[in-house]
Amino acid sequence: MSTKSCPVPTPEQKRFMEIRETVEKTMLDTIYKAIDDAAMEMADKVRSAGIDIPPTERDYFIFAAQQVLFVRLCGGDPDTLEDGDPEIGERIVRNGQHIIDHYWRGKSAQTSDGASR
């Protein structure tokens, strides 16, 4: 029986990972704040313009960011949606499906037709 284990990171590798995690958290905090700011700015501008239509909600801006980042990850142009790599797109979609199945539905996930995955 073979047991695989992850190697213990060196002090330098551990410090590298700590730095990356800190930078990533800062980046994500910036993204979340930008999304919140966009939703607030939209509400303020709609109200100031006297428009009697509910302002665009925060989820729209989250979706807009997700779409642009998805297209960029696939190597496409977010303005035209052209030139993306469908193979990369499929891998990203499969990763999203894995998150749904593993973390949100549990390991015995069912497809919409009742078949197990």
Image (cartoon, rainbow, N blue to C red):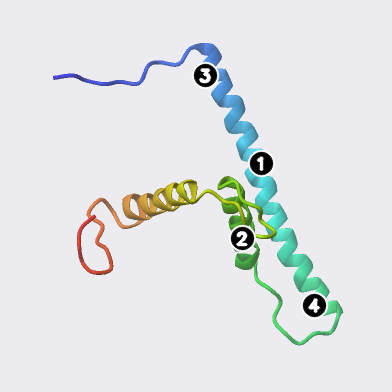
N-terminal label among 3 and 1:
3
- Amino acid type at image mark 3: Lys
Place of residue 47 in the rendered image (x, y in percent of width and height, measured from the top left): 81, 79
- CA gap between label 3 and label 1 equals 20 Å
Disc on res. 27: 1
- Look at the image and tell me in which quarter the N terminus lies: top left
Place of residue 103 in the rendered image (x, y in percent of width and height, measured from the top left): 35, 51
- Amino acid type at image mark 4: Val
Place of residue 24 in the rendered image (x, y in percent of width and height, measured from the top left): 61, 37
Residue labelled with disc 4:
46
Q: Residues within 10 Å of mark 2 (few under 14, many from 20)?
A: some
- Amino acid type at image mark 1: Met
Q: Residues within 10 Å of mark 1 (few under 14, many from 20)?
A: few
What residue is shown at x 48% (from left), y 46% (from top)? 88
What residue is shown at x 66% (from left), y 46% (from top)? 29
Residue labelled with disc 3:
14
Disc on res. 80: none
Place of residue 79 in the rendered image (x, y in percent of width and height, measured from the top left): 70, 59
Per the image, label 4 sits on a secondary structure element best described as helix
- Look at the image and tell me in which quarter the C terminus lies: bottom left
- CA gap between label 2 and label 4 equals 19 Å
Per the image, label 3 sits on a secondary structure element best described as helix
What residue is shown at x 48% (from left), y 12% (from top)? 10
Per the image, label 2 sits on a secondary structure element best described as helix
- CA gap between label 2 and label 1 equals 15 Å
Disc on res. 62: 2
N-terminal label among 2 and 1:
1
How many marks the image carries: the answer is: 4
N-terminal label among 2 and 4:
4
Lateral position of residue 30 relative to residue 15, left or right: right
**Residue mark closest to the camera, 2 vs 3:** 2
